[in-house]
Amino acid sequence: MSKILVFGHQNPDTDAIGAAIAFSHLQNQLGKDTEAVALGEPSEETQYALDYFKLAAPRVVASAKDEAAQVMLVDHNEFQQSISDIADVEILSVVDHHRIANFETANPLYYRAEPVGCTSTIVLKMYKENQVAIPKEIAGIMLSAIISDTLLFKSPTCTPEDVAAAKELAELAEVELEAYGLDMLKAGTNLSDKTAAVLLDLDAKSFPMGEANVRIAQINTVDLNEVMDRQAELEQAMAEEMTKNGYDLFVLVVTNILDSDSELLVAGNAIDKVEEAFQTKLTNNRALLKGVVSRKKQVVPQLTAAFN
Amino acid sequence: MSKILVFGHQNPDTDAIGAAIAFSHLQNQLGKDTEAVALGEPSEETQYALDYFKLAAPRVVASAKDEAAQVMLVDHNEFQQSISDIADVEILSVVDHHRIANFETANPLYYRAEPVGCTSTIVLKMYKENQVAIPKEIAGIMLSAIISDTLLFKSPTCTPEDVAAAKELAELAEVELEAYGLDMLKAGTNLSDKTAAVLLDLDAKSFPMGEANVRIAQINTVDLNEVMDRQAELEQAMAEEMTKNGYDLFVLVVTNILDSDSELLVAGNAIDKVEEAFQTKLTNNRALLKGVVSRKKQVVPQLTAAFN
């Protein structure tokens, strides 16, 4: 029971897995006994990065309390995005770059959040503050996390700190940033062999908004039509997920990582909230949002405001 | 509307006011336009420290949104301990050393919490990280905050970081730490001229626990009997406060700062929860808790566990 588990959110993206690996390594260098784990299998994008830097994927866990009394969270804080039994273990620390909601502890803890584009940017700062050296492969997965979260610096969530951190990590990881970044992002856009249910679950999070339970999934692509040609199949899968999990609203954000635009596909009763949030009219349950690529900055706050 | 307000919790103690002054000064040096304000008048202890270091007491405010769109919180996060209209303004940052509960934002923010004894210990770290020099009087009020929160290092919340920070700040403030600290703490124990209602409000916070609304007040003294001789008067004032504010349980913690013990005086329906939390029996609504001086570490978690 002594080992401390370190993990990112459900449906892990490259930052959820990369920041867990990097933060666990830092904590171990500082004398803690931690293990980086994950709340799901790596995506193809993340697997590309893990393979490139010869890192093993973290063990997938579904619950914590049978093997650990204490945990550390990275890249998330909202309990509904965390491990199933998060309320039964002690949260020692959180490193994150999201809004704070549906999160509470009984005891004081270490909480480090900054409004930057990627958790790994904050973890890099903590390595420096503690004067711990970053191994090449860990620099590589942290770099991959920043590229992923900022869509190679194109996302409005990207800050100068993220760009500087990525450049510094690219040197440590000994890769050419732009070329590696585009290859990694493209590795995550291989969608054709996936069912609609799998696509909806690649990068999906739930958010309580007002009284509603809102599911927001995001899919990255280099061709919006490749996804939208499967609208009927996606809508059926969205309806099934809503019934199964009690979502009131399901918003699918399909993002073209080359053009930096997104198309929404929406299901549920609160479609008027979506139209209000984005000041648009849905046609055939769809709307194109020019320049929108960030769920965190360009979708969640707008929808939250419409519900409140 | 451009100025950012920086403040600590309601019923401000020396850290709530000191950390606000220090963090506001740091932010201004970093280019922000902030003003340290307070959600109440300084206590006699805090006033002693402000006078000693020739600092003006922060302006007292009751609401934020009419004069500021953005705020920064120090030494608290729980909304019921914050400004009345906290939900109507944007929280840009939090620096704190408490548990996190009843706190949420729509947007990512800067959040820095560490499980140390005093917010000002964290603020000192942030001055150093940003390489900003600390003026003598601001070092003095930060030192005073650490002495206050740790009861001159006797509280179990006190960490080696707090002790090191206080020593460093005492040099900057040019005071003899122990002598100044005891004088300041004693300045806060002048209780005889205060009504029971005033005593109950000196350092009181509300906590949601399970379904219950729990009020926990703390009074520092050098003589427990001086306070407990006024039990009847205190119990009447506690009953009035409970009716007026809908508290289910009122716990008064009277702490002898010289002996590091506390006596509880309890009112309300959930007295069994208090007995369970502290594994004691109340006699005449009272119980002596040897070695208990910290509400945060030795009262709130135990009571929270009893309610959950």
Image (cartoon, coloured by chain):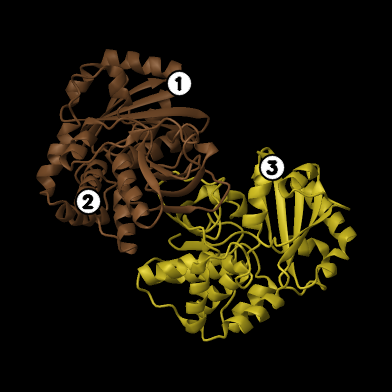
Chain colours: A yellow, B brown
Quarter of the image for the C terminus of chain A: give it: top right
Residue B8: % across, % down: 37, 40
Q: Is label 3 on the same chain as label 2?
A: no
Nearer the observer, B238 or A142 = A142
Residue position marked by numbered label 2 in the rendering: B139
Q: Which mark is residue B245?
A: 1
Mark 2, Cα crowd under 10 Å, few <14 / some 14-19 / many 20+, is: many
Q: Chain of mark 3?
A: A
Amino acid carrying mark 3 in the image: Ala
Indicate whether A267 appears above or below A212. Answer: below
Identity of the residue drawn at 56% across and 57% down: A76
Indicate whether A110 appears above or below A146. Answer: above
Among the 4 quarters of the image, the one containing residue B206: top left
Residue B9: % across, % down: 38, 37
Q: Secondary structure at mark 2?
A: helix
Q: Which mark is residue A306?
A: 3
Identity of the residue drawn at 30% across and 64% down: B131
